[in-house]
Amino acid sequence: MKYASIIPLAGGMTLGAMKTLGGYPEYIFSWSDFKNNDKQLLNYFDKKNIKYNYHVIDKDILKEKIYGIDIVTGVPPCGGLSMFNSSNNKSCNSRGPNAKQNDWMYKAANYVLEVIKPKVYIFENAPNLYSKIGEPVIEKLNKIAEEFGYSTSIVKTSTHLHGIPQKRSRSFFYFWDSLYAPFVKYYNKKTNDLATYLNENVNDNSDIILYDNLEQDPTLKFLKEDVYWGDISKLRYNMKNGNIKSGIDYIEKYKFEEDYLKWCKKTNNKKGLKFIERVMRKRKDGKSYWNDSFIYYHTYTNAIIAKTLYRILHPVEDRFLNKGEIISLMGHPKDYTELKNINMITQNVPVNTAADWINEARKFVKGELLISTQKFLKQNNIKQKVE
């Protein structure tokens, strides 16, 4: 099948398409705003001697007509609908359904459906696109679909259902060249525990340390002292059996707040002192707070984002996860070493998750999907049902 990518960023959707469809994309479309991010994938292609046709929509003039593209994949920015950046405020232009960042979804959809006219356009976005918060955005997307004669559907899923131990909830939105939307298959693939997965999927960046000193985390340094069970293996054992996810959760569960506060003052640990004072103040006021302490997972991680990727304790070794392990948890190839900025990997799609939903697009093109009687369809892969 012939396929193309639009706004590929670090390449998760494009690599997912390559995994499912074989070969390479006929075109890669983007805008100048994303060239630095897209460069990560293009550098990887250069290293692999993969030829590509990269078209910058706002700069280049297409020198040829685009014919016969079956599937287009995309990763338009989702900052406006991010779980950490959402709001129902109708006047808000930086968060929620009215955020300016959401315009890239509409720009990309208009370009794909008008210029490329594929049989399927699928893009990945924040989980809030599936929720009530995303309804105004979906309404606009459905109007675009109606204008060009497409039906639509949206799927909610999590990466841990696609063979990677990362609980990363996301939405995938489809434009179908069909009067009515088809039903897609549900996925629930076996996923190894975190330690086994990391051992079996070693990336070539695994010698690059992100956060090389456990002592830099005040909560961990405090909890490593003998009075609090000493070594990290005992700490991990208690966290695993107590279902405790982070250093501050551990301190709260065992009511060590005052001890930690005194320790921070005694050792002049300004970072820890500022953190625990903020936590205690927020808790007293009944407010939530951002957790800056180390994180421990043994079965699967929560969504890897820029604010947490440096603080994930290895499930069995006395260190934090390295750069290669973070890349592996996004499903990228072993030799994908092009990331100059590791944060770019979080603004991306895990390859396995993308590959499975692109596989549903492939089946549609081959006429293998059951067609519904609805122009717009919502399917929840986590609950495995139509909603």
Image: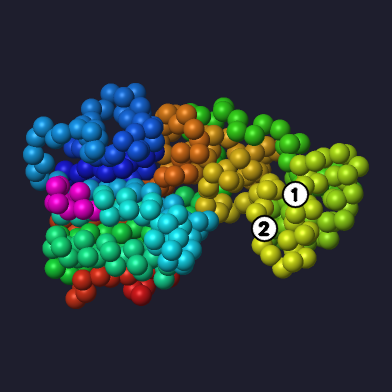
Start and end of the magenta stretch?
A: 109-118
Marks 2 & 1, CB-CB < 8 Å contact: no
Horizontal side of residue 270 vs 19, given as left or right: right
Rendered position, 168 above or below 307: below
Horizontal side of residue 81 vs 303, given as left or right: left
Secondary element at tag 1: helix
Toward the viewer: 146 or 75? 146
Toward the viewer: 198 or 65? 65
Percent of width and height locating residue 217: 73, 41
Closer to the chain start, of discs 2 and 1, is 1
Mark 2–mark 1 Cα distance, whole angstroms, equals: 10 Å
Amino acid type indicated by mark 1:
Phe
**Measuring 14% from the left and 60% from the top, which residue is drawn there?**
148
Percent of width and height locating residue 195: 58, 45
Which label was assigned to residue 343? none
Kindly indicate the quadrant of the structure image that contains residue 212.
Answer: top right
Amino acid type indicated by mark 2:
Tyr
Do we see residue 224 in this rendering?
A: no
Toward the viewer: 228 or 91? 91
Magenta span contains residue 119: no
Indicate the quadrant containing the N terminus: top left, top right, bottom left or bottom right.
top left
Which label was assigned to residue 289? 2
**Measuring 26% from the left and 43% from the top, which residue is drawn there?**
5
Q: What residue sits right under mark 1 in the picture?
A: 275
Rendered position, 110 above or below 25: below
